[in-house]
Image (cartoon, rainbow, N blue to C red):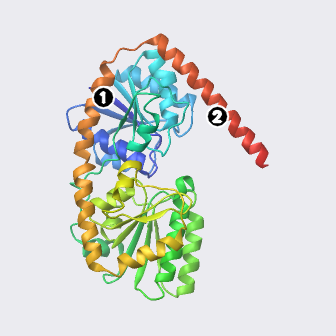
Amino acid sequence: MRIIVCPHELAMGGSQITAIELAAAVRDRGHDVIIYSSSGALADRVDDLGLELVISPAGNRLSLAWARGLIALTTSFDPDLIHTYEWAPSLGAAYGVRQLLATPQIMTVLSMDVPEYLPADVPLIVGTEALAAEIRSQRDVDVIEPPIDTDTDRTVDVAAARRRLGLPADALIVSVICRMTDELGKASGVEAAIDAVSVLAEKLPVRLLVVGDGPALPRIRARAQQVNAQAGRLVVEITGNMTDASTGYESADVVVGMGSSILRAMSFGKPVIVQGERGFTRLLTPHTASEFLWAGFYGSGGNGADDLLPALRKVLSQPLLRSELGAWNRDLVTSGFSLRRAADRLESLYSNAATSPHHRTQATVRLSQSLARLAKFYVARAVRRRVRT
């Protein structure tokens, strides 16, 4: 098969990494795959994997230029299928190549909700069983949890990883690896980690390693500088973006975060503390796993640093517990979230989508409904902004 994969951008992030690594896994099964996306930090990862990249205009919002570029690429490449990630590329492809050229399309949304304005007749993949159950009565939906390359993402030599980052060999390292944004509560989670570690640092040789870039980074960096100045030593280390964050995971004693970052940390055999929006914090154990396996490695509601502090203190003070949780996490992610398993499922979905008949009249009706819902969404958002001002 010939496939065009469209991440919404190539900034560092779980959805984008999933798109790229699954594209490479499908390519390795003998398919011809092109990535169509605006450039970003992950462009080097695309190159490392030997994937062809066609640079697009920005795709994280609706763009006529983006859609025109995809139409031109589709005309020249003649793909069997377009695979879009997140809402803007999915709408752009549905309004463009699927409607005008009748090119089959499948879309993935790895956010914690699915916008109601996405066309209901385009096959959809989501990342959690809970989200699929919520919308299954309304549309065709399948589940592929964010996959992890468990063959590559594994701990080999913690001491060497720490040397590469200049980290103390005897320190207790807490890693947070994510995009620094207010979306999904990510930045507030990082700030909670800074606050919790600043308290622990009064009695423990602990250091927080913060890896990632994004619009909230200046605010987070300022908070880290304040904590370091008060402690008189380096308690919070901000690295910014790392094209390959493997050393950040391998160096850690415990990883704090959400979504695919948590899964990747589990693949490295690390104990993990799951965060979410509005202060959600919970240590992943065999007793708490069921809720995350159903709803994703995320949550809502909690006390932020006040919940994170005792969870970190518990894990960091018990080496045996860290070892047991890390080994259990590694087994769980290897058995249920491997890249190989996800690629098997995706290849099957590609085959089904590419061979399903295209009903132009039905597609036109669905797109009209989608446009109406999209217009309603924008009007409602404009009203909310006007009320706030």
Image quarter where the N terminus lies is: top left
Residue furthest front in the image:
287
Residue, disc 1: 350
**Position of residue 86 in the picture relative to residue 163 (left or right):** right
Identified at 35% across, 43% down, the residue is 20
Along the line of sight, which residue is nearer the eye, 247 or 367? 367
**Position of residue 231 in the picture relative to residue 315 (left or right):** right
User: x, y percentage for residue 102?
Assistant: 42, 16
Along the line of sight, which residue is nearer the eye, 373 or 175? 373
Mark 2 to mark 1 CA distance (whole Å): 30 Å
User: x, y percentage for residue 304?
Assistant: 53, 68
Evaluate whether residue 142 shows in this view: yes
| Residue 84 in the image: above or below residue 231 | above
User: x, y percentage for residue 352?
Assistant: 29, 24
| Residue 322 in the image: above or below residue 185 | below
- Name the residue type under label 1: Tyr
